[in-house]
Amino acid sequence: MTTIRQRRVGKGTEAAEDQPSEETNVKPDGKILPDPPGRKVWNILSITIGGIVAISLGLLTSVYVATLHENDLWFSNIKEVEREISFRTECGLYYSYYKQMIQAASIQQGLHGLVYDNKTESVRTINILERMNVYQEVFLSILYRILPIQQYLEPVYFYIYTLFGLQAVYVIALYVTSWLLSGTWLSGLLAACWYITNRVDTTRVEFTIPLRENWALPFFAVQIAAITYLLRTHLQPAQQRLTLMAVFIATFLFSLTWQFNQFMMLIQALALFILDCLDMLPTAKVTWLYIIQISGLLLVCVLQFFNSMILGSLLISFNVSVLIARTIQKNLKTGGLLNRLGKLILHVLLVLCLTLLINKFIKKILNLESDEHIFKFLKAKFGFGATRDFDANLYLCEEAFGLLPLNTFSRLSSTLLFYVYGFVLFLLTVAAVIVAFRNLRGSDQVHFKEKKEEYTVTLKPDAAYSLVHTVLFGCLALSTMRMKYLWTSHMCVFASFGLCSTEVWKLILKCLHLYTSQRTQVIRYSIPIITLLYIAFKFWPGIMDELSELREFYDPDTVELMNWIKSNTPNTAVFAGSMQLLAGVKLCTGRTLTNHPHYEDKNLRERTKQIYQIYAKRSPGDVHGILRSFGTDYVILEDSICYERRHSRGCRLRDLLDVANGHFHLIGRQGQQPVNLLSTSDFPLKW
């Protein structure tokens, strides 16, 4: 079993007005008035300082996670095989293609080996570039080969430093998004500090480096920052075109680097759809965003050799349905309250029906079944009946796919993040309901009336999008723990924006009859500064202690196994076993596999289920026949699976197989304990 053991060596005020979140000097005809010279100079100075702070925080975050990775594993000192074993499960599989491209005689031969791969799945040739999102590994390997850095930097360091560098991009994007929403870079500083101090719940890059989400989420954050800027009012045509180009590039890169891109962008499309229906976003900009999502995904589809799973995605069906329904219902946003509600209900039903019909038609034409396991899992997860399906039950028993643990909120509350987030979420939700009601009613004003003044509740388009975005991704995180990183990072942005927002404090003070412009400015700067001081005082010592703690990677059993395989088996040998361990076998030894952890293929899922019969109640003859049908020469049996007692009955791998094979009856709903198959102390048995 892989462990981390203690290393046996010695331990060697910004408080001024920033650039406003919206242009305020606007003529009645919509033209923007030039700023006074003094204010223009101040804005340039503020942007310069804020930009320097953003870049500095991004670089510090990158160095921080790189240092944690080094301190946890002593990565610079361990052997190459130990470094590769540290890339656990599917991470090792992805990194193996980078290693394969580096070791190829030429770039052309490396690409040919990926397009016609016969070592990832035995007795079968597959196109890796079609099946998996590994273009980033291809790009990095080519870059490493053409740059004159081979003598100074090992391939593995070039790889991991790139991922840690993307963390800088991630933090800068979060910083800029918060800055755009609030109008002050103090908000971005607070968002970045929250991201760092809540690292356990905002990222896992330091111990799952090659994971697809670590590539994709920085680009997703850049896309959200670009959308936030796009939704601002009074953009010049050139600014809007450049912003749309930035959104497209970020969307394309996000889609290219993660196989779950379509599901994340579907949630984003739902957010746009809801806000557009409630007339809270400009329809023209929403249309452009729908088109960008479709075009970005189709471009990725072309690069992945027309991957059928992309063509059959719900996102494409949904976006096309929205555009068709909008063409049919041209007068959706006219009339009184009841009239508009009726049109809205009809519009939603039309979009839903069209989405299902188009998606069903595409899947029927393409005979697509690659994503059926996801829908079986969702059906079982949300209580629509028990299932004997092996794949669905395997997901149900993984802790990462269970509900978000309650202790997550206690950790987030210790930094004040969750308290502030809940406060801002409540206020903006109330404001959004008022604005939505006003829009549906067709009235021009909803007022808070006082004796001497009248205040109209408003919600800017970028703030409205951020609100719905955080609500929808919050629901996703609550239902599936693995997706929490999409929510918690944006939680930092949303909470810091609310704490530094003039509109939020103005609304509060108006309701309390305490509003003055000077008081609003004092509060919007003083409270974030106090929060930053609290975070620094409470967490700086812990961060320093964490950076000074030295450990080392320690997994002698798996190291011995990999060395045995390389020394005692031919290069053409085919290995069967758990898909998690086999990913490491491919990376460390280059041997051929029967199955692997990239689960988005129906044939592979069926193959994995058949290979796992070695742990089921099957006769030796049956198991031997199954293994030989896949060309297996060696099978790795793991005592952690054979004698598993850590998990409740019903979630052990052998129990899942017996249920799927009909040997056991279902015993209620499956538990949520993980089946973590990482290393083994057994040696292979030759058939």
Image (tube, grey):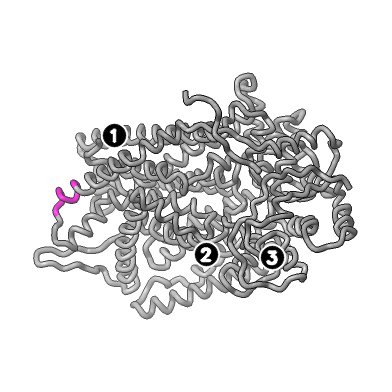
Using residue 127 as the reference point, say whether residue 490 is left or right of it: left
Q: Residue at x 59, y 49 (%)?
A: 258
Tell me how many marks there are. Answer: 3
* Pick the front one: 329 or 126: 126
Q: Earlier in the sequence, mark 3 or mark 1?
A: 1
Looking at numbered disc 3 in the image, what kind of residue is underneath it? Lys
Looking at numbered disc 1 in the image, what kind of residue is underneath it? Ile
Find out whether the residues at labels 3 and 1 contact each other: C-beta distance under 8 Å. Answer: no
Q: Quadrant of residue 648?
A: bottom right
Q: Residue at x 39, y 71 (%)?
A: 333
Mark 3, residues whose alpha carbon is within 10 Å: few (<14), some, or many (≥20)? some
Q: Earlier in the sequence, mark 1 or mark 2?
A: 1
The secondary structure type at the circle numbered 3 is: helix
Looking at numbered disc 2 in the image, what kind of residue is underneath it? Leu
Q: Residue 649 got which mark?
A: none
3 vs 2, front mark = 3
* Pick the front one: 3 or 238: 3
Whether residue 520 appears in magenta in the rendering, the answer is yes
1 vs 2, front mark = 1
Find out whether the residues at labels 1 and 2 contact each other: C-beta distance under 8 Å. Answer: no
Region rendered in magenta: 516-522
Return the residue at label 2.
323
Return the residue at label 3.
363
Return the residue at label 1.
44
Q: Position of residue 481 (x, y in %)?
A: 52, 56
Alpha carbon separation for disc pair 3 and 2: 20 Å
Whether residue 259 appears in magenta in the rendering, the answer is no
Instruction: Note whether residue 131 is visible.
Output: no
